[in-house]
Amino acid sequence: MNSWKCSNCSFHYDAKEPYETCPSCGKKCGFSEVTNYVPKMDRTGRKCACDLCGTEITVTNDCGGFLKCCDQLMVLK
């Protein structure tokens, strides 16, 4: 199954093939395949916390990667 996004209204849905007419805006729009698209999120200035020990940090320079504490991923606040 693929994920599709309407070029007009950004409606997002999962199907094998794109629709001819968008079910959201009702127009004949172009659909982009966005199956494995994950936008990069800038975490600079965001707070993260460890659910296990409660340690909190503020991201000062986001170079990507995972933030871990107590051998588990930290959660964005």
Image: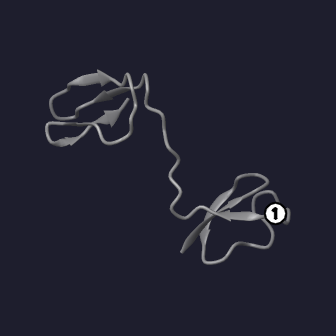
Is 11 situated left or right of 40 in this image?
Answer: right
Q: Amino acid at mark 1?
A: Cys
Q: What colour scheme was applied to this rendering of the protein? A: one colour
Q: Residue at x 36, y 25 (%)?
A: 59
* Quarter of the picture holding the C terminus: top left
* Quarter of the picture holding the N terminus: bottom right
Name the image quarter holding residue 21.
bottom right
Disc 1 on helix, strand or loop? loop
- Residue ranking furthest to the right: 27
Q: Nearer the viewer, residue 40 or 11?
A: 40
Is 18 situated left or right of 30 in this image?
Answer: left
Q: Position of residue 72 (x, y in %)?
A: 20, 43
Q: Residue at x 43, y 26 (%)?
A: 44
**53 over 3 or under it: above or below:** above
**75 over 54 or under it: above or below:** below
Q: Position of residue 37 (x, y in %)?
A: 53, 57
Q: Residue at x 32, y 29 (%)?
A: 48
**15 over 23 or under it: above or below:** below
Q: What residue is disc 1 on?
A: 29
Q: Nearer the viewer, residue 77 or 30?
A: 30
Label 1: how many residues lie within 10 Å, few (<14), some (14-19) or many (20+)?
some
Q: How many marks?
A: 1
Is 30 situated left or right of 73 in this image?
Answer: right
Q: Position of residue 9 (x, y in %)?
A: 76, 52
Q: Residue at x 32, y 36 (%)?
A: 75
- Residue ranking furthest to the front: 63
Name the image quarter holding residue 33.
bottom right
Q: Position of residue 22 (x, y in %)?
A: 77, 64
